[in-house]
Amino acid sequence: MAKKNIFGLGDIQEALRDAGDPWEAGVTSLSSLSVEEQKARLGVTPPPGEMTIEEVALQAEELKANIKALTISSIGAPAAYDLRNVGGKNYVTPIKDQASCGSCVAFGTAATVESRLRLQRGDPNLAVDLSEAHLFFCHARAEGATCSTGWWPQKAFDAFKSKGVTDEACYPYASGLAKKDCSGLCSDWANRVVKITGYTALTGQTAKIKEWISSGKGPVSACFVVYQDFFSYREGIYRHVSGSQSGGHCVTIVGYNDSPGYWICKNSWGTGWGSAGFFNIAYGECGIDTWLNHGVDAIDNTGWHYNCLVVGLWTINQDRNAWAYLQGYGWRKISAENDNIFLDMLSQLIAAKTAARPINFFEDNGVIKQIYVL
């Protein structure tokens, strides 16, 4: 029988009043769940040799004041930045819901990669939707992870680098949640994966986190300690005011604001929680910027891409120097290995553009190596 959540909304609101009302608590899609059901929405489980949740919480509390002061006083980045509004353009993909499964690591890392891909392509409207089911129910499951055990961020990023993650249509999360295995994966998944070239550890380096986000490198994944009051968060700048620890959770930092000092984060609990699925959290709070922060270096540009339109061509008075602009991918250099290859591909691209015929193309680090005109 599920343990009743006796820590009620009234208790949280009273504690908030005593703390000066830093944020607003209310009824959310998670606030009325049992303690066990709430914990099932987390999923960062430290492996042997890593700090425990309790140790992370203690360290965060000790560093809080210093981290906040250093973050606000850091120079080299704008005082505020939000990837949801970069000159009126939104590079953050929509909010999702991990449901009752400890798969937050898959959602936090996938969200980080999705926005990095949009930024790398220079297209805020790029239709990218990666499969958390592939990442969690295939890659994580192969390492023994389950909805009950959760996973670890570095392992998720390693999977993105070595194996890649396919798109949501290839393996929808709802199907994976029902199966909790890899049997629902589409047959051509290997031709549809997104890979990363690597990832950078930014833990505790708040000035670098701000610079990473504001310089166009993308959001930063983050883990933090969740307390009972967090499940009732509606809006404002979250600080822990009441309730015991519930566990570790992985999200994505998509922006920040030095006045008065908070990170803007994308969660994976659906739009019925928080501010339509997003939340603000104070600098230094709950380990959000001192535990498992990572940025994606780049998206691997090697592989096949399908059904693309050639919308632009560029060349100059230099031997074998021509580029094609491919819708959704941007400028790509045409292989200059020899005259025959170069001229043949250039002529095919010209014909495809003139006839508005889509192409499949293979690229190797931004260089077009093969073309198939559809």
Image (cartoon, grey):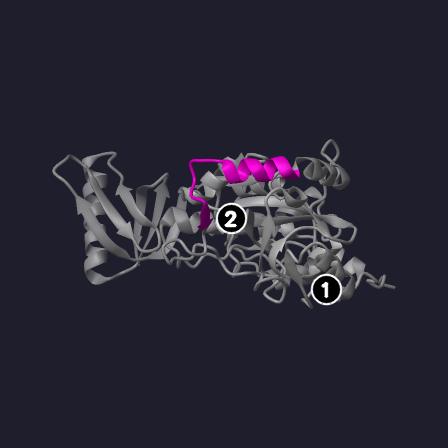
Q: Quadrant of the C terminus?
A: bottom left
Q: CA distance from mark 1 to mark 2?
A: 29 Å
- On screen, 131 above or below 293? below
Q: Check disc 2 and report its element: helix, strand or loop.
A: loop
In the picture of the structure, the residue carrying the numbered disc 1 is 31
Q: Check disc 1 and report its element: helix, strand or loop.
A: loop
Instruction: Looking at this view, name the residue that lies furthest to the right.
Output: 1
Camera-nearest label, 1 or 2? 2
Give the amino acid at mark 1: Ser
Quarter location, residue 344: top left
Q: Residue 146, how many percent across, how many down?
A: 72, 50
Give the amino acid at mark 2: Ser
Is residue 76 located in the magenta-colored stretch of the structure?
yes
Q: Nearer the viewer, residue 223 or 369?
A: 223
Q: Residue 163, how many percent across, how many down?
A: 54, 42
Q: Nearer the viewer, residue 314 or 263?
A: 263
Is residue 6 located in the magenta-colored stretch of the structure?
no
Residue 279 numbered tag: none
Taking the spot 37% from the left edge, 38% from the top edge, the residue there is: 365
Q: Earlier in the sequence, mark 1 or mark 2?
A: 1
The answer to whether residue 135 of the structure is visible from this angle is: no
The answer to whether residue 76 of the structure is visible from this angle is: yes
Q: Quadrant of the N terminus?
A: bottom right
Left or right: 167, with 88 as reference point: right
Left or right: 273, with 51 as reference point: left
Query: Label 2 near label 1: C-beta < 8 Å?
Result: no
In the picture of the structure, the residue carrying the numbered disc 2 is 259
Which contiguous range is marked in magenta?
64-81
Instruction: Looking at this view, name the residue that lies furthest to the top.
Output: 49
Q: Residue 14, how many percent across, how many down?
A: 75, 61
